Image (cartoon, coloured by chain):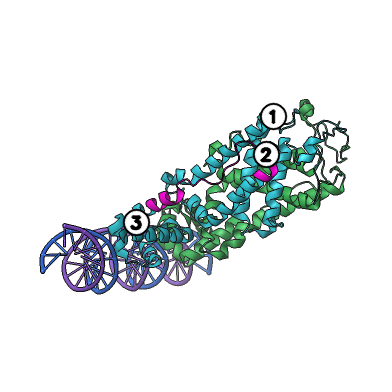
Chain colours: A green, B cyan, C blue, D purple
DNA sequence: AGTTTATGCAAGTACATGCTTGCAGGCAAG
DNA sequence: CTTGCCTGCAAGCATGTACTTGCATAAACT
C-alpha cells in the first residue's frame, strides 16, 4: 500500500522534474501527477527537497547491462552496439539530464548524480581501448600515442553525448539518421586509434565470426 | 541616463539568469544585481517575461569575427584556431547555455536563441570542408564519401560542444588540457576526412602501404 | 520659472508555494 | 469489535513573487 504510493510518487516526481526542473517541481504538480493528495507527499518524505533527493537517488543508482566484452572480438561491432545502447539511454533521459545539468548551478550536491554515469562509462571505454592495444588490434606506428588514445576516447564520448542531447534541437547539425551517425563516430574513433576496420565487404555474412580469437589486425584482408 | 539603465538591467538579468534560470530570475534579484529599484524594471519593460525576452535578443544577436578563411591555406592551424575560438566562447557562456537548454522545455519560443549560433557555425564548417575537398586537400580514396564528410563535421562539432559543456563537471573525462584536446579533435577530424596533416606530408606522397591507410602524420614535436 | 521625465521609496494586492493541523473514513490485524 | 495506520479533505499560515499605485525628488528641457 504505502510502498506502492512511495514508488508512484517518486516516478511522478521524476516526470515532473524532467519537464519543470527543481523549482518548477511543485508539490502540487507532483501530487497531481501521482494521483495522490498533496499532504501525502509531506507525510512520506517530510519536505519537497527530501522527496526530490530521494527521487535522484532512485533514478541514478547504477544499472549495469551495457558492458564492453572483456576480450575484444569484433571492435567495430562491439563498440557500435555499446555506443548505440548508451545513446538510446541518454536520449530517454534527455529532458531529465538537461534539467539536472542546469540545476547543478544551485544544487552542487547533485554533482555525483550527474557525473557518476558518464565517468564509469568513460573508464569502461578506456579499459576496452587498453585491451585493444595490448591484444594486438592496434597498428603500431608512432601516430597512436597514449595521448591520442585518451583524446580519441574523449572525442567519441563527447560526440555521442552531443548527439543524444542536441539532435532533437538542431536537426540541421545532424543530417544523417542516428544509426549512420553512430556508426561513423565509431569508425572515425577506430581509425584515429589505428585499429584496422574491415570494410563493408563482409556485410554479406555478418554473424560468422564469434570466436574470441582476434583477426590479424595488420593484414588489410 | 535611461538607456544606461536599460543596459545595466539587461546585463544584470543575463547574470542572474545564468545562475538561476528563468524561474529563479526574480525581479527582486535582477533589480538588486543591477543596483536599481525593482519598480524601474516594470517601468522599462512592463513585465518580467518581456525583460527576459529582451535580454535573450540582446545576448543572442549574431556576432561575427570567428570565420574560417575563404581559401584554405593551412587546414590544421586554421581549424584549430576556429575551434579554439568557439570553445572559449561557449565556455564563457556555459552557465547561460545550460539554463537556456533546460528552459527550452517550458519556453519553446526560445528555440532560435539556442540553435542559431551552433547552426551557423556548423554550416560554416561544412562550407570550409567543401572548399577543402574542391581545392585538392582531400586525398581521393573510397573511404571518404560525402556521408563521411558530413559525419566528421557532426562529430567535431559535438566533441567541441561536449568539451566546453562538460569539462568542468567531469574532469576525469578530460585528462588532457584544453589545448591538447582541441588539437587532437582537429587532427582526428582531418584524418577522418582524408586531409594530409602537414604540408610536408602532402608534398611527399609516400604510399607504399595499402590504400586504406591514411598517411602517417608527424608525432610530437 | 515651469514642466516633463526618470527614478526611488513605501505600501499594497493577488496569487503561488511549502508546509501544518484537525477531522473523518477505510482497512487490515489483534 | 477495537485499535492502529494510512489516506483524503478542507482549512489555514507564512513567505515569496509579479505587479500596481501614490508620492517625493532631482535632473533635464522649454
Q: Kindly identify which residue carries mark 1.
A: B145
Q: Quick check: B28 left or right of A137? A: left
Locate residue B108, reporting x and y percent.
43, 45
Task: Decide which of tag 3 and tag 2 comes sooner along the chain.
Answer: 3
Q: Quick check: A25 left or right of A218? A: left
Task: Decide which of tag 1 and tag 3 comes sooner along the chain.
Answer: 3
Locate residue A159, reporting x and y percent.
65, 45
Task: Decide which of tag 1 and tag 2 comes sooner along the chain.
Answer: 2
Q: Secondary structure at mark 1?
A: loop
Q: Quick check: B71 left or right of C1? A: right
The chain ID associated with circle 3 is B
Q: Is residue B60 magenta?
A: yes
Q: Is residue A105 magenta?
A: no
Q: Quadrant of the N terminus of chain B?
A: bottom left
Q: Secondary structure at mark 3?
A: helix
The answer to whether mark 3 and mark 2 are in CB contact below 8 A is: no
Amino acid at each position: 500500500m504505502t510502498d506502492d504510493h512511495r514508488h508512484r510518487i517518486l516516478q511522478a516526481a521524476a516526470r515532473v522534474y524532467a519537464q519543470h526542473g527543481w523549482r518548477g517541481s511543485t508539490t502540487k504538480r507532483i501530487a497531481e501527477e501521482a494521483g495522490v493528495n498533496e499532504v501525502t507527499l509531506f507525510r512520506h518524505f517530510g519536505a519537497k527537497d527530501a522527496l526530490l533527493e530521494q527521487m535522484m537517488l532512485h533514478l541514478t543508482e547504477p544499472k549495469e547491462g551495457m558492458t564492453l566484452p572483456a576480450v575484444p572480438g569484433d571492435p567495430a561491432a562491439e563498440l557500435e552496439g555499446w555506443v548505440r545502447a548508451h545513446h538510446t539511454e541518454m536520449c530517454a533521459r534527455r529532458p531529465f539530464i538537461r534539467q539536472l545539468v542546469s540545476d547543478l548551478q544551485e544544487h552542487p550536491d547533485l554533482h555525483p548524480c550527474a557525473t557518476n554515469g558518464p565517468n564509469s562509462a568513460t573508464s569502461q571505454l578506456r579499459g576496452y581501448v587498453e585491451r585493444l592495444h595490448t591484444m594486438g588490434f592496434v597498428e603500431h606506428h608512432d601516430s597512436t600515442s597514449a595521448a591520442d588514445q585518451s583524446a580519441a576516447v574523449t572525442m567519441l564520448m563527447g560526440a555521442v553525448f552531443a548527439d543524444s542531447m542536441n539532435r532533437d534541437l538542431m536537426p540541421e547539425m545532424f543530417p544523417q539518421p542516428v544509426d549512420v551517425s553512430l556508426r561513423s563516430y565509431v569508425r572515425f574513433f577506430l581509425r584515429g586509434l589505428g585499429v584496422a576496420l574491415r570494410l563493408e565487404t563482409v556485410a554479406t555474412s555478418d554473424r560468422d565470426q564469434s570466436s574470441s580469437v582476434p583477426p590479424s589486425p595488420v593484414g588489410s584482408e
